[in-house]
Amino acid sequence: MNARTFPPAEQPLVSWPEEGVTRVPFQVFSDQEIYEAEQKKIFRGPIWNYLCLEVEIPNKGDVRTTWIGDTPIIVTRDETGKIHAMVNRCAHKGALVCLKERDNVESLSCVYHAWNYSLDGQLKSVAFCNGIRGKGGMPDDFDVASHRLQRIKVATFSGIIFGTFSEETPPLEEYLGESIMRFLARNMDHPLKILGTHSQIIHNNWKLYAENVRDSYHATLLHTFYTTFKVNRLDMDGGIVLSDKKWHHISYAKRATLDVADEYKQAQVHSARYESALAAPQLLDAWNGFDDNITHSIQTVFPNFVSQLTLNSLAVRIFVPRGVDKTELYWIFLGYETDTEEQTRMRVMQSNLTGAAGLVALEDGCINSFVQRGTKSSPDAEAFIEMGGKVAESNESSRATEAAVRGFWHGYREIMGFK
Ligand code: FES
Ligand SMILES: [Fe+2]
C-alpha cells in the first residue's frame, strides 16, 4: 500500500466554550488573525454591508466614498441615475482613485498615471496608450474593455444602499427579514435630509460596539442621563425583536408608559440623580411622530449598521474596523423634507444626546475601551452573557436581557465557522 501524506488539518482560530452564545472568548477582541479572517469571511463574505444613503448621492455624477470592513469603496450615481459601487483601487497599480468623501464628477480619474474610468467603474482610457510620438505605450493586445474597478453588487431599501462582494449573498429582502424591513421603513422611508455628520475614533474592537448597541440591559445603568430624565428606561413598555436569523435586532421603548419600578429606587442598582434638573429642559422637547407610541428605538443590521430614533433624533451610524483595537464610528443625523423649521430645530437640539461629546453616547465609546483594556491580556477568559436567559429570541415584555447580544454571536459564529 502506498504511504500517503495529508496536509495538517486546519486549526480553528478560536476554541469557543461549549456553552455557545452565552460565552464569548476574549481572544476574539484582540487577535490579529481573527481580525483578518473577519475581513474575508464577514465583510467580503456573503452578507450585505451598509454603503451610504441615497440622499448622499442625489444627482448624476455624485460620488461617495465609504468602507466595507477595511476595504475602501466608491459609490456613484451614473448619467442614467443608476447606482454603482466598486472597490476604490485602481486597476493599474492599486492606488486609491477617489480621494474625497463626496464629489461630483463626469468620470473617475486616478491621479497616479491618469487611468480614467466611467461612473460604473469601466476603464475608458489610458494616458499615453500609444506612447509618445508612436514610441512606447501599451502592447498591441492591450484592451481597455478588459479592465475595470472591481464591481460590488448593490441593492437599496428605504433609501439605504447596501453592497456585497459575494455572489452567494441572498437577496437583500431575505437578508434583512420582514420585521427589520418594516421598522427600517417606519423610520427611513420618508424624503430624508441630512442635518449633520461627524465621526469619532473609539479604542476598541468593532465587535464590542456591535455588542454594545444590542445591549438593552446597559442603557439604563451606564446612561444615567436616560434614567434620570426618563428618556429610556426598562420600566417603560418596550421590547427586543430579533430578525429570523437572529443577526439583526430592534430595541424599542414607549416613554409615556413609564411606571417606576422599585428596582430603580435601590441605590446600588445605578447612580441616577433624581434630584437633578436640566437648565435647558427644551433639550427634551419632542413630538410624537408615529401612532405606535414608540419614542426610542435602536435597530441593527449585521455586521455594522445602526439606525436610531431617540425622541426625534434620527440617525444612522456605521462602525468601521480600523485594526484589531480601533474602530471609526460615523454618524449621520437626519430629518424629513416635510419637517417644519421648529421640528428641524428640535431634532438638532436632541442630537446633543449622542455622538462623541453627547450627553449619553460618549459613555459607550468610553466603556468599550474599558472592556478592550480589561480583556486584552486574558484571551483565554470569557464573557458571561446570560441576562434574560440563555437563548437568543425576541422578547416584547422586557429589555432586561442580553438576547440581542447573543443573537449577534449566533450570526458571527455561523459565518466565521466558530462552532
Ligand atoms: S495606479 Fe492608477 S493610473 Fe497608475
Ligand atoms: Fe449605550
Image: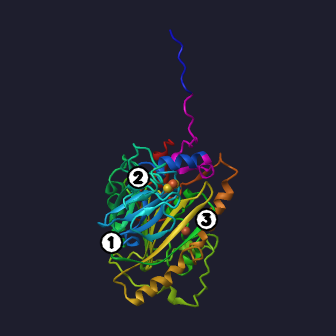
3 or 2: mark nearer the eye: 2
| Identity, as a three-letter code, of the amino acid under mark 3 | Ile
Measured as percent of width and height from the top left, residue 264 is found at 56, 74
Q: Which mark is residue 70?
A: none
User: What residue would you read off at disc 3?
Assistant: 202
Residue 389 appears in the picture as rendered: no
User: Which one is earlier in the sequence, the residue at label 2 or at label 1?
Assistant: 2
| Identity, as a three-letter code, of the amino acid under mark 2 | Arg
The reply to whether discs 1 and 3 touch (Cβ–Cβ < 8 Å) is no
Cα distance between the residues tagged 2 and 1: 34 Å
Under circle 3, the secondary element is strand
Under circle 1, the secondary element is loop
Q: Is 240 displayed left or right of 375 in the figure?
A: left
* Label 1 within 8 A of ligand 2 by Cβ: no
Q: Is residue 218 magenta?
A: no
User: What residue would you read off at disc 2?
Assistant: 148
Q: Quadrant of residue 226?
A: bottom right
User: What residue would you read off at disc 1?
Assistant: 189
Measured as percent of width and height from the top left, residue 400 is found at 50, 64
Which residues are the magenta region?
A: 8-32
Measured as percent of width and height from the top left, residue 44 is found at 46, 50
Cα distance between the residues tagged 1 and 3: 30 Å
